Image (cartoon, grey):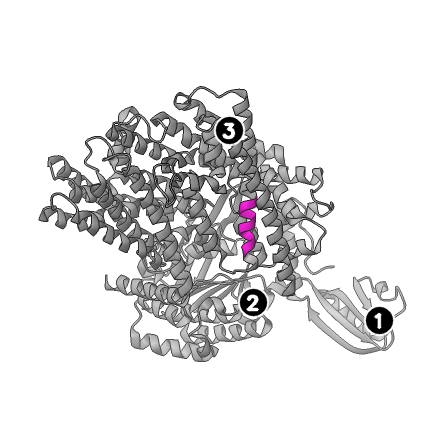
């Protein structure tokens, strides 16, 4: 990510959200960079689906030996559709090298220029992420569409318009939530040097608790100490599920009606919280940082 | 040759010294790889709460399956400790001209390139694998026969050899194409297929995939055969697989060497 | 170690019509070009080396002088066996370098400036020990040579530190030591003084001169610094755009490529404007100091007239500076490449 070059172009504008033209320029540069690795991205996008192939075979074997037709409400076909849908969610919510990039710029001091300039670092990062994501979608839409079309037999019939609207909303929210979660994570570098292990631990928990590995409903039979509360209920309260599980479950019709509304409200709540936390951490972090006069 | 062993131990010693200097980092790396592993183990336990076996009639019930996982941990730990660190540096070496200085030494380039850096923190997983293996085997309804115990370590070596050959061929591709793509990515995708017993690949799509990954790119032999030797009753078929695995190991190492030497002959040395 | 029966006559390096071409892909500029780049990539052929001929005898110290991109490094890489040529042959110590025979690799050494060959994480002492193993150096001999070289360069206090912590100059000294531990017969140096400060450069020059004489090593050194050449060797090969422009001694470059000499006059008083130009030679006037470029054949003629016409405090008659000659050579070759008429006299301003 050539953020240094792009940040120069954005310095001409001030305020919370940078000028549209500079943003457009960044978009174009990003697109050019992607196209430069021509065979890489075509192959790379398809290869990302390969682990799903293994998971599908695994679950098929699990179903074959268990003589059940569904596990936690998911049939075998449901599970295939579920994994594919989590890929779609991840295309929105995953923020590659966001936390790492922020922590690195804090460590090597390049974050300083954002402290001096009248530019909003977080806003800048968000804008550049949007640009990168758009480019990614442009470039990845064909492989994604091809794979989903090829696997359309595994999907249940499409849900109604309202559910689709809720789905799209949850995707957009998952992008923002994912962004603020990782941006906050990266800013831990203001206090700790060895951030990579912390980031790794976060990735670990996120992988486990977001539904990336398996639908969270499967934890429904696992008790916690409290009566009537299963492990699934606890995990569902955390923000992680929205980065993979929630939108997928919505599309598949596993979350409906009042539960759906509640889920969206919780997602929005987490988003608001994370925006606040992120800003707060930035404020405290930069205060501390400038104190060093490095 | 004794010379190669001495050189190997010089590198190993240097790596160990460095790891011990950065003790905290080393411990953190051990913990993170253990973390990943525990997560996967939890997942497997979850699966077994839904089913007694993976794959109808495959024989991979809970304890045999965990023996399979343990075998995978041991083999991957060996590969990650001994070969991956050096191999993944290869792109960087091609870019900075480090490969040039390897080529002017009167020493086998493949040896130097695949074995000059080690990652001892990856041994943590292997140790856990040994523990897991003991736990699982103790719970087997039938103790494996002596011959299974004799074959097991040999088959582990074969599994490592097959993976080593794959690494070398990927390294050769890196040299030829001077790619930016990290070796780890390809590696992850290829070895992902061998995370579970080969028996899960069944059906109109599964069978061809299984044959391909057994006979063409034999990653399904790596963990399956040693684990199967211990965990499942021996039969004519399984002994056949043992022979196949030995052959695959030899071919993998031999073929990869040929490919690697060919890549070196075409080396462009595009650095500066 | 010295198999003189292998090499007929005493030619250590024989190069015949050695050429190397690369196919290079152009990076597309702009969005539309990037999209097109998905389907078709523009490529062109780079001639790094065009049919070079060279012979080097035992014990010679040869400098290859040329601007960046001239092909010097490519040439050394071919002679070290790192890459294979597109056509042509070469023999070093009787071996074909790109066969990469262990026997060959044990008898030469390559040092590349600014590129590290020592193992980055190991202290230099460990790297040396590694070298001993790799090159199978007898331990007693190894210790003797190592101590000798370390003393000569005064780096014994650096041996325990990991190489990555040392400065460029210190690293280069250790690289040179490492290269000489196995007593190579041929030494290839690729821009060894690049990026070094003046003191370090001088130390290395002294060191190389001493070593070369003491051990009769055949040395091929590439550089784009005139300083290296002037300090170290008699034989110079000038390379530009993949071809050898000149191969001979340094003094002869002056004779061969210039017809002028530079006459510098220190006058009592600054001359009147236009006065010096009257003589019809190109000149530079800085106050009372005048430099003129005068045709060699006419100096005997013109000089007395000059001295008579002015009040002269001091006079010197010198060759055109080497840097200028060589720069002119490079320029001429570049012009030839670009299709411009090169028949410009070098040194004539």
Tags 2 and 1 in contact by the CB under 8 Å rule? no
Helix, strand or loop under label 2: helix
Q: Residue at x 9, y 46 (%)?
A: B145
Neighbour tally class for label 1: few under 14, some 14-19, many 20 plus, Cα within 10 Å: few
Q: Earlier in the sequence, mark 2 or mark 1?
A: 2
Alpha carbon distance from label 1 to label 3: 95 Å
In the picture shown, does residue C88 fall above or below C103?
above
Say whether mark 1 and mark 2 are on the same chain: yes
Q: Give the overall secondary structure of the magenta segment.
A: helix
Chain ID at mark 1: C
In the picture shown, does residue B263 fall above or below C291?
above
Residue carrying label 2: C229
Q: Residue furthest left?
A: B146
Which label is found at residue C287? 1
Say whether mark 2 and mark 3 are on the same chain: no
Q: Quadrant of residue A87?
A: top left
Residue carrying label 3: A258
Chain ID at mark 3: A
Alpha carbon distance from label 3 to label 2: 85 Å
Q: Nearer the viewer, residue C85 or A129?
A: A129
Mark 1 vs mark 3, foreground winner is: 3
Q: Residue at x 53, y 68 (%)?
A: C168
Helix, strand or loop under label 1: loop
Helix, strand or loop under label 3: helix
Chain ID at mark 2: C
Which label is found at residue C348? none
Q: In the image, C248: left or right of B157?
A: right
Give the magenta part as a residue range: A180-188
């Amino acid at each position: 990510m050539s953020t240094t070059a792009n940040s120069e172009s954005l310095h001409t504008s001030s305020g919370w959200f940078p000028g549209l033209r500079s943003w457009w320029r960044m978009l174009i540069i990003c697109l050019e960079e992607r196209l430069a690795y021509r065979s890489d991205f075509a192959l790379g996008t398809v290869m990302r689906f390969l682990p799903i192939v293994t998971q599908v075979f695994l679950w098929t074997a699990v179903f074959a030996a268990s003589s059940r037709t569904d596990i936690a409400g998911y049939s075998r076909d449901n599970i295939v559709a579920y994994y594919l849908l989590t890929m779609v969610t991840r295309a929105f919510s995953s923020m590659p090298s966001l936390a790492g990039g922020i922590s690195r710029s804090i460590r090597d001091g390049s974050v300083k220029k954002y402290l001096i300039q009248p530019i909003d670092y977080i806003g800048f990062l968000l804008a550049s992420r949007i640009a990168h994501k758009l480019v990614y979608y442009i470039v990845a839409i064909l492989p994604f569409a091809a794979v989903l079309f090829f696997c359309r037999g595994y999907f249940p019939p499409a849900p109604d318009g309202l559910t689709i609207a809720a789905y799209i909303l949850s995707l957009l929210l998952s992008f923002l939530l994912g962004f603020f979660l990782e941006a906050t994570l990266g800013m831990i570098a203001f206090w700790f040097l060895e951030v990579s292990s912390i980031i790794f631990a976060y990735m670990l928990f996120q992988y486990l608790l977001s539904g990336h590995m398996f639908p969270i409903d499967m934890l429904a039979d696992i008790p916690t100490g409290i009566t009537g509360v299963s492990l699934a209920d606890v995990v569902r309260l955390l923000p992680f599920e929205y980065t993979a599980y929630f939108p997928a479950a919505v599309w598949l019709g596993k979350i409906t009606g009042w539960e759906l509304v509640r889920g969206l409200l919780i997602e929005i709540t987490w988003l608001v919280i994370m925006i606040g936390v992120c800003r707060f951490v930035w404020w405290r972090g930069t205060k501390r940082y400038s104190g060093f006069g490095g | 040759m004794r010379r190669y062993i001495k050189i190997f131990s010089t590198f190993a010693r240097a790596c160990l010294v460095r790891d011990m200097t950065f003790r905290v980092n080393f411990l953190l790396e051990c913990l993170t790889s253990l973390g990943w592993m525990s997560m996967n183990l939890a997942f497997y336990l979850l699966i077994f709460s839904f089913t007694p076996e993976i794959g109808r009639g495959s024989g991979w019930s809970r304890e045999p399956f965990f023996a399979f996982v343990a075998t995978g941990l041991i083999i991957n730990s060996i590969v990650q400790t001994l070969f991956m660190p050096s191999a993944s540096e290869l792109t960087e070496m091609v870019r900075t001209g480090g490969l040039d200085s390897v080529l002017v030494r009167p020493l086998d380039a493949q040896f130097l390139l695949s074995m000059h850096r080690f990652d001892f923190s990856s041994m943590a997983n292997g140790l856990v694998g040994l523990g897991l293996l003991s736990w699982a085997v103790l719970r087997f309804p039938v103790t494996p026969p002596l011959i299974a115990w004799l074959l097991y370590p040999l088959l582990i070596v074969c599994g490592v050899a097959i993976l080593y050959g794959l690494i070398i061929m990927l390294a050769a591709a890196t040299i030829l194409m001077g790619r930016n793509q990290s070796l780890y990515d390809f590696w992850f995708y290829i070895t992902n297929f061998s995370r579970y017993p080969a028996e899960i690949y069944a059906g109109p799509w599964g069978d061809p995939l299984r044959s391909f990954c057994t006979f063409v790119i034999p990653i399904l032999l790596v963990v399956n055969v040693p684990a199967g030797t211990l965990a499942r009753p021996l039969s004519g078929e399984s002994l056949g697989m043992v022979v196949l695995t030995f052959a695959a190991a030899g071919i993998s190492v031999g073929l990869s060497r040929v490919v690697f030497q060919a890549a070196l002959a075409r080396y462009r040395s595009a650095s500066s | 170690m010295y198999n003189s029966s292998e090499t007929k006559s005493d030619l250590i390096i024989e190069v015949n019509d050695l050429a190397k071409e690369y196919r290079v892909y152009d990076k597309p500029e702009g969005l539309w070009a990037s999209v097109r780049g998905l389907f078709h990539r523009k490529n062109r052929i780079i001639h790094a080396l065009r049919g070079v001929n060279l012979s080097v005898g035992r014990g010679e110290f040869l400098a290859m002088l040329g601007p960046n991109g001239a092909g010097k490094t490519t040439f050394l890489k071919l002679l070290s066996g790192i890459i294979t040529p597109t056509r042509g042959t070469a023999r070093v110590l009787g071996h074909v370098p790109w066969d990469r025979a262990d026997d060959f690799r044990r008898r030469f050494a390559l040092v590349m400036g600014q590129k590290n060959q020592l193992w980055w994480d190991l202290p230099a002492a460990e790297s040396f020990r590694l070298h001993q193993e790799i090159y199978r150096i007898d331990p007693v001999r190894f210790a003797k040579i190592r101590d000798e070289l370390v003393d000569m360069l005064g780096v014994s206090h650096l041996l325990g530190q990991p190489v990555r912590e040392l400065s460029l100059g210190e690293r280069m000294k250790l690289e040179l030591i490492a290269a000489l531990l196995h007593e190579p017969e041929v030494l290839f140096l690729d821009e060894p003084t690049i990026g070094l400060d003046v003191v370090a450069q001088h130390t290395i020059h002294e060191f190389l001169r001493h070593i070369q004489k003491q051990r009769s090593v055949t040395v091929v050194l590439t550089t784009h610094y005139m300083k290296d050449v002037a300090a170290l060797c008699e034989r110079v090969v000038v390379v530009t755009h993949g071809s050898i422009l000149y191969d001979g001694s340094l003094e002869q470059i002056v004779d061969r490529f210039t017809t002028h000499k530079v006459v510098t006059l220190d006058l009592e008083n600054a001359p009147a404007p236009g006065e010096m130009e009257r003589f019809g030679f190109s000149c530079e006037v800085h106050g009372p100091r005048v430099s003129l470029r005068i045709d060699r054949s006419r100096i005997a003629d013109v000089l007395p007239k000059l001295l008579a016409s002015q009040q002269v405090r001091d006079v010197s008659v010198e060759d055109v500076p080497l840097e200028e000659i060589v720069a002119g050579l490079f320029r001429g070759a570049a012009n030839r490449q670009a299709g411009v008429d090169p028949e410009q006299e070098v040194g004539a301003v």
